[in-house]
Image: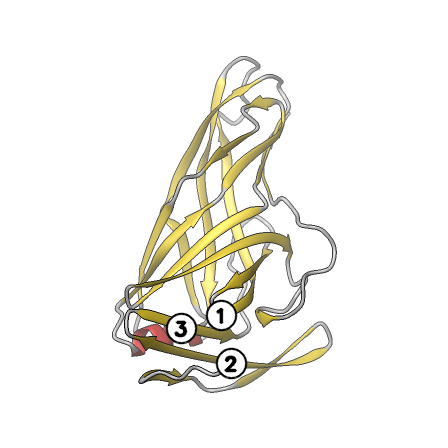
Amino acid sequence: MQVDCHRRIDLKRGESVGRGRLVRSTLALAVCGSSTILAVMAPSSPAHADTSAYELYCPGTPVGTIVMNGTVTTGSLSPAKPSSGKTFSVANFQTTIVLPVQLVSASAALGNKVVSGTYKTAIDVTTGATPSSISTGSQTYKVTIPKPIPAKGLAVPTPSSPATVGKFKASSKTVSASLDQHVTFTLIVSGSPLTMKCTTYKNNTEPTGITTHKPKGTPISAALAHAG
């Protein structure tokens, strides 16, 4: 991709191996008037959490199709064992994305002191409760860019503090909650949003970065909590 603006930063290149092939890592970031153009292809570090990591496949962004691996979401039922006919929520809901060091460095080089944006999805209850889905609403995150920037990237929890989603009403002692397959993630760079409408897949279905490939297989619903 060619980015032809007066404020452009080309970051150093590296290489990573994904699915048996060599991937060239690069990132270019430019501010063109009021618009920010971002191109990124870089390996990510998995966030550490009790839930399994998964992939965000985000086609049709202003810079092409973006894949982000190593995303994790946590959450727990509150109360932990809801009784039939009683209400419950999903507590401690939070998603952590590790932003690659190249992206954080580019934002810092443009004078940004923080990385910020929004995250939105829904909690689906597949077993034992109504309604079947509740939106998380647009949740915000804001993380100060440290000095030095961690070599493995910057962990960004969103929302910044764990949230509570719901109320659901239990119809059985067996309840299963999962993350909806559709996620909207927005990154603000120098006041301009880069919005990604993403679908969740098994982690590392495609290498992290910009791709022309659609992941093989079908989307997944990341499990959050279960009772019964």
- Mark 3 neighbour density, 10 Å: few (under 14) some (14–19) many (20 or more): some
Question: Would you identify the image quadrant in which residue 186 lies?
Answer: bottom left
Q: Nearer the N terminus, badge 1 or badge 3?
A: 3
Comparing 190 with 54, the one in front is 190
Comparing 42 with 72, the one in front is 42
Q: Horizontal and vertical percent for residue 200? A: 60, 52
Mark 2 → mark 1, Cα distance in angstroms: 8 Å
Vertical placement of residue 126 versus 33, above or below: above
Question: Would you identify the image quadrant in which residue 124 lies?
Answer: top right
Q: Which residue is mark 1?
A: 63
Mark 1 → mark 3, Cα distance in angstroms: 7 Å
Mark 3 → mark 2, Cα distance in angstroms: 11 Å
Vertical placement of residue 149 versus 218, above or below: below
Tell me the amino acid under the disc marked 3: Ile
Local SS, label 2: loop
Q: Nearer the N terminus, badge 2 or badge 1?
A: 2
**Quarter of the C terminus within the rendering:** top right
Q: Horizontal and vertical percent for residue 2? A: 47, 83
Q: Which residue is mark 2?
A: 1
- Mark 1 neighbour density, 10 Å: few (under 14) some (14–19) many (20 or more): some
User: Residue at (50%, 44%) from the top-left corner?
Assistant: 74
Confirm or deny contact between disc 1 and disc 3 (CB under 8 A).
yes
Q: Which residue is mark 3?
A: 37
Confirm or deny contact between disc 2 and disc 1 (CB under 8 A).
yes
The count of marks equals 3
Residue 150 seen in render: no
Local SS, label 1: loop
Tell me the amino acid under the disc marked 2: Met
